[in-house]
Structure formats: C-alpha cells, structure tokens
Amino acid sequence: MATLQKIRTQGGLLVAIVIGLALVAFILGDLFQSGSSLFTRGRLEVGSIKGESVQYPDFMTKAEQLAEIYRSNTGQTQLNDDEWVQVREQTWENMIREKVMGDVYDEVGVAVSSDEMFDMVQGNNIHPIVQQIFTDPNTGIFDRGMVVNFLKNLEMGVSPEQRNYWLYLEDQILNERLQSKYNNLIGKALYVTGNEAQTSIEHRSRNINFEYLVLNYSSIPDSAVNITESDLKAYYEANTNEFKVEKTREIEYIIFPVEPSPADFAAGERWINEIRDDFRNATDNVQFINSNSDVSFVDVWFKKESVPANLSAWIFDEGAVVGDVFGPYFENDSYKLAKLHASEMMPDSVEARHILLRATNAQEAAAAQMLADSIKGLIEKGSDFATLARQYSTDTGSAVTGGDLGWFGRGMMVKPFEDAAFNNKVGEVTIVPSQFGLHIVQTTRKGALIPQVQVAVLERTVTPSTQTNQAVYAVASKFVSENTNRQKFDAAAEAQGLVKKVAVVRESDRMIPGLDSPRPLIRAAFDAEVNSVLKNTDGSPIFEFGESFIVGTLTKETEEGVAPFESVKVRVELAVEREKKAALLADRIRTASEGKSDMYAIATALNASVNVASNINFNSVTVPGVGSEPALIGTVSALESGALSKPFKGNTGVFLAKVNSVEDSGADDIDAEKTRLVQSMGFRATYQAYEAHREAVKIEDYRSKFF
C-alpha cells in the first residue's frame, strides 16, 4: 500500500529513534529451565522508576515494539548489535520520561483532549507528520480524504505493520503536544527585568583593554611549602564535591592471542605448492580464482608503476607472457601465485562526458531506459550533447558544463562507467547502468597507448587452525586453573613474562580499547569480588573476544559517592600545595606593588613580564597569552578604567591586572535585549525543567545485569 511506503520512507525524518543490540539468549535459556531463580521478581527487575519496578518482559516488549518501528522505517529485517544497544537505551529513556512527566502533566493539569487529537489528524490544524505522509506527490497538496480513508480501514483494511506504525505516530503526536503545552507553561513564567537586560548589555558591549602579569605556580619549588596531614584533611572535608566518583571496577587481564602457528604456515605453503600446476593449466582464470582463492579476482588494468615491484619486474622487465605463473611468494600473511591474465596496449586516461538519468525503482528504471535510448539516438543523429546534458542530466555538477567530466584515469570512476569510457571509440556513445542510475557516455579523447595488464592472484591467507585455537585455549585454561586468585595470578604472570593490561570500567560501559565486544568481561567485573578471577555467566574463567582468549582479575572496586580520603590523597596534596603556593605568590605581588601603579615597574620588581590584551568582555572565553582564565576575565570586567586589581588566583598562577581603557560598543536596545534573554532562557528551561523533574525522583538502573 502506498501509504505504508510513505510512512516507511519518511518515518526516519519524522521520528527521532535511536537503536541498538540485546544479548539476552542466556537469560531466555535460564527462564525456561525448571526451578530457575530468575523466576523471582527481583531477579527479573531491570530497574525501577519512582519506586515502580520495571520487569524484564515488559521492558523487552517495549524495546521490540520500538525495534519494529525502526525496521519499518529502514526496511531492515534484522538489527545489528549497535542498533539494539541504542533501541534499548531509547526504550529506557522513553519509560523514564513517560513516568516522570506523566505525573507532572497530571499535577499541573496539562492534557490533550480527543477533540484536539482529531483536529491534529483530520481537522483544521493538521500536524506536520500527518501532512507530510498524506500529501499527494503529484500535486504537493495535503489530501484530507487520504487520511479519512486510511483511518476507516485502520482496524481491518491495513496490515498489522501499518496499524502499529500509525498508533506509534499518534503516540508521538500526543506526547509532542503535551510537551509543547508544558514548555509554553514554563515559558510564560519567564521574565527579564530592565536591570537584567541593562546588565547583560553592559557585559556584552563593555570591551576592556588591560595589562596583566602572572607568576606561575611552578615558579615555587615544592620543597618551599610545608603541608601537614591536618591541612590535607581540612581541604578534603571542605571540598568533598571535588572528589565525587562513579561506580567503577578496575580489572587486570591477560590476552592470549590466537595467532597462526608454524604448522599453519607450513600448511598454507603446502597448499599453494600443490595447486600451482592446476592454476597454470586453468583455462578460466577468473572462475578458478573465485573458486579457490581467499581473495576474489580483481578486475582492474594496471600500468607498470601500479604493479607491485616483484610482479612488475617479472612482467615488464623479464617479459612474461599471458598464461605465465609467478611464485609462490609470501606477502601480507598470505602465500600467493600470480598469473598474467591479460596484456594490452591501452590509453592510460580518457576524456569523456555523460548524461545521468537517476532511477530509484523498477518503474523509474524502465522510463529512464526509454529516455536514454531516445537521447542516444538524437546524439548519433547530430544533436548537441552539451545541450541535451543541460536539459536532461541529473548530475548537477557536470550538467552545467554540458556533461563534461574532463580527463580521468583508471580507478577514478565507478567500474561500469570506467569500462564504457575506456572501451568506447572516440565519439562513440553507449548506455551503461551504475549504482547512480543510467549513464549516456561519450568518449571524446583518449590518451597515449601504453602497456597495461591484468593479473590473476591466487591467495591463501594463513589463519589459525582449529588445532592452534585449541592449543591456545589450553594454555589459557591451564594458566587460570592454576592461579585462582589475584596473588597467584600476578605471580604467575610475572614468572611467565605475560603482560597484564589494566582497565577501569563503569557498569554500563561497552568498550575496552583493544578488545572486540568485551561486554561479558565488563559485566563479570561487577559480579566478582576484589582479588578474585573474573568468570563468565556460565562459570568459565576464559573469555573469547575476536581472535583472543582473555583471563582477568578484579583488582579494585569503587562505589558511587565521595571517594575515601586515602584514595584521593595525592590529588588533595596537589590542591593544597597549589593553595599554599598561591598564598606565597600573592604576598610576593603585594610587596612588589606596594605604592606603585605602573605595571611595568611592578613587573621589574618581580622579574616578570607584562602582557597586553584588547577587546575582552565578560562573555569572552580565552585571553591571549594564557588561554582559558575565567578569573582574569571576571576580575578585569569588574574594574573601572585605570584601576589596578589585587593579586588573585587563576588556573596557571597568581595574576595582577590593570585596566587601561574601557570601550562601549553603544548597544542600548533594552527591549531587544529582553527578548533575546527570554528566548535564551526558554531554550534552557525546556531542557532544565525535565532534568529537574528527573533528578527529583529515584531511578535505579539494573540493565547492565541483563545486557
């Protein structure tokens, strides 16, 4: 049905859906085992929102519904891992928003009546989504009759996919309307006073020219400051917000890579030698390569300089002829045989022009073919190619120049187009299809003829055999079975010269650099005890990612909250050290500036240099010479012309600044500034209102135990 096709093709533009992968087979398997503990409600809980439990079956039902919408949009039958990850994430966020904002809407009385929904779907204020789907493609006019007919058939006359998709769109329209009403309600409460607008204008229009000097913290040696334990604990207690941490786990792991063994290399070399005569005697090189080689035949013509050096010498210097075989030779982890497949004198480049007719379906392709045949006939009868290109070509880049593509060499165009352009005689016109549509190609000039060849390469890539894989697994298994705790694990790794890698992961992480899809290892880290060996859900201590086996231990766990003093003591020491250095530097500046107002005189006394900055205002982000220094910008913004600041701390050191002049840009439209500020506040309020409601409720997320 045409309507469903429109919904599918345009849905991606209408609904923001983000998608991803559910690795749940092990859970489903457990569910069907008699007496499984997963049947308990607690073990099936993927989270809770405002005290209401979210159960795994309910969550996955909603996720599958969202996935089905995505499949309808894209025409896909399956979602990949990343798409499923994002679908589950979007499902979770939708459930949070529905619960949090649903209660808010009820409390403030925001609702959408059935009459409003009717008006947005069939009435006088049609929602843009409905307008876009039910617009007649021939006239570009919205057709209300199409909507009415579709809805009349919604229960019995349309497919389940259409019905589900429509219900989903109705839900999106309803939610968007509710959110819009709530945002408007918030917006009506926003107000900017005249004083606020005036202050904002002054901040934006007051450009400051000033001088400053800075004494860097590094100018004082660490030994010059005395730090006591009480200093550290006092700072820690006063600044606990600086030491908040997430729930994390630190793991150490060893990679046992599965790499080809000497026996695997020997097997590859034996295979290539045994097949050499068959390859030499083959009459159909392309079929032989595609049937036997690990890499398919490459249908490309090469110049001498484009062929690898060993083959170039054999072909062009030693005079190989078509049918000759070179090798075996070893290259890029593969044993290879090369056979000279073809050799011709061919141009190295051509000049051509084309007319492109695009087609996105069978009906358009048939029409494009008829038009292409007609255009080709006109050109062959003497019609001007350039005029026809400007009239018919859908390649807007070349149509303006009459379809001219200039000179190009091999490998610069899509293969069907390239073959046509190089195989044509000069002036000949051919029609050739590609992924872009139908090309009407005319070759206008050809370059000088040079020797070019095609080489059929038979390749056997050396990969680990089953025996090699099993041998590496046995090594990893022996290691982990003999070293069942961290102490033994570390000692054995050191004794055997094995490299331990370290990773700090959060419960929701899906990536560890260098490992392929390590989610099971991350999940295991949060199920293990410190100093124990990590284990899969099936109890195995060996993880397989890509071409490697992994074993690991949990070395450290951190719970969400304020980090213990001892774990952040080094950071505290650095902070306290900087505070004490700042005090010393500030005293040094105060002493040097006493009785002085000239920055250069003060700088001389401090053996420092003066920097100059111009046109800095309150909204500036950086200062020339020192980069991001908010304290410097804030201080000079508050000073009057000619004023000298007191010493103050910055990111890099202690500063002293003097304002030389202040220039006003003259902006004084209070009403315009009020409007600008209200709009800016409105944009922020839309996001911040939801975030405030979300932060006010308790949300527990246990999805990492399932996915």
Image (spheres, helix red, strand yellow):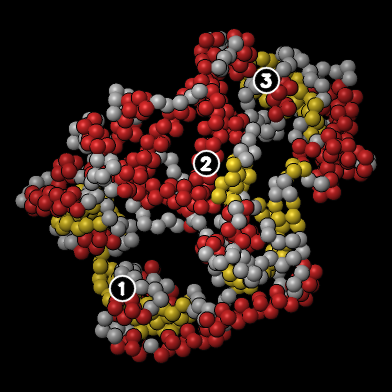
Q: Position of residue 269 (x, y in %)?
A: 47, 86
The vertical placement of 677 against 163, above or below, is above
Q: Position of residue 478 (x, y in %)?
A: 69, 79
Of mark 2 and mark 3, the one earlier in the sequence is: 2
Q: Is residue 557 visible?
A: yes
Q: CA distance from mark 3 to mark 1?
A: 69 Å
Closest to the camera, between mark 2 and mark 3, is: 2
- Tag 1's secondary structure? strand
Where does label 3 land, which residue? 209
- Tag 2's secondary structure? helix
Where does label 2 land, which residue? 95
Q: Residue at x 70, y 31 (%)?
A: 629
Q: CA distance from mark 2 to mark 1?
A: 62 Å
Amino acid tagged 3: Asn
- In this view, the residue in front, 164 or 305, is 164
Would residue 231 be found to the left or right of residue 443 on screen?
right
Disc 2 to disc 3: CB gap under 8 Å: no
Closest to the camera, between mark 2 and mark 1, is: 2
Q: Position of residue 33 (x, y in %)?
A: 55, 67
- In this view, the residue in front, 42 or 34, is 34
